[in-house]
Amino acid sequence: MSIFTRFRDIVSANINSMLDRAEDPEKMIKLMIREMEDTLIELKSACAGVIAARKKLQRKRDDIDERVDLWAQRAELAVSRGRDDLAREALVEKRRFSELG
């Protein structure tokens, strides 16, 4: 269930609950608004956390991609210099980083 669906359900439930026991409609509306504002603050905080986590993961992914490219270049360089042993080691490292991404 998405955060927004949950928010909608909470608001709907709160409205129905408050209407059922509506002693003073003005007070009930103010209470509903306050609860909605609190929920909105929680939603904004949750969204900010998700966005920050996504950016962090993207930075890690970019770093891994750079390392894969670096090890591929090192393997090519080793082959061009006749160092097949180093090329194999570089390809092992490239594969290790490829599996992380």
Image: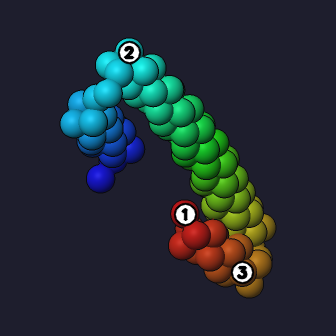
Label 3 environment density (alpha carbons within 10 Å; few <14, some 14–19, many ≥20): some
Q: Amino acid at mark 2?
A: Glu
Q: Residue at x 32, y 27 (%)?
A: 23
Q: CA distance from mark 3 to mark 2?
A: 73 Å
Quadrant location, the C terminus:
bottom right
Question: Is residue 24 shown left or right of residue 30?
Answer: left
Residue 52 in percent (x, y) is at: 63, 42
Q: On screen, 83 above or below 10?
A: below
Q: CA distance from mark 1 to mark 3?
A: 19 Å
In terms of sequence position, does the residue under pointer 1 or pointer 2 come before the other?
2
Residue underneath mark 3:
89
Residue 48 in percent (x, y) is at: 59, 37
Query: Of circles 1 and 3, which is in front?
Result: 1
Quarter residue 85 falls in: bottom right
Instruction: Looking at the picture, tell me which residue is in the foreground, 100 or 71.
Output: 100
Instruction: Looking at the picture, tell me which residue is in the foreground, 31 or 95.
Output: 31
Residue underneath mark 2:
26
Q: On screen, 67 above or below 96?
A: above
Q: Residue at x 22, y 36 (%)?
A: 20
In terms of sequence position, does the residue under pointer 1 or pointer 3 come before the other?
3
Residue 55 in percent (x, y) is at: 62, 42
Residue underneath mark 1:
101
Question: Is residue 8 shown left or right of residue 53?
Answer: left
Instruction: Looking at the picture, tell me which residue is in the foreground, 74 or 23.
Output: 23
Q: CA distance from mark 1 to mark 2?
A: 55 Å
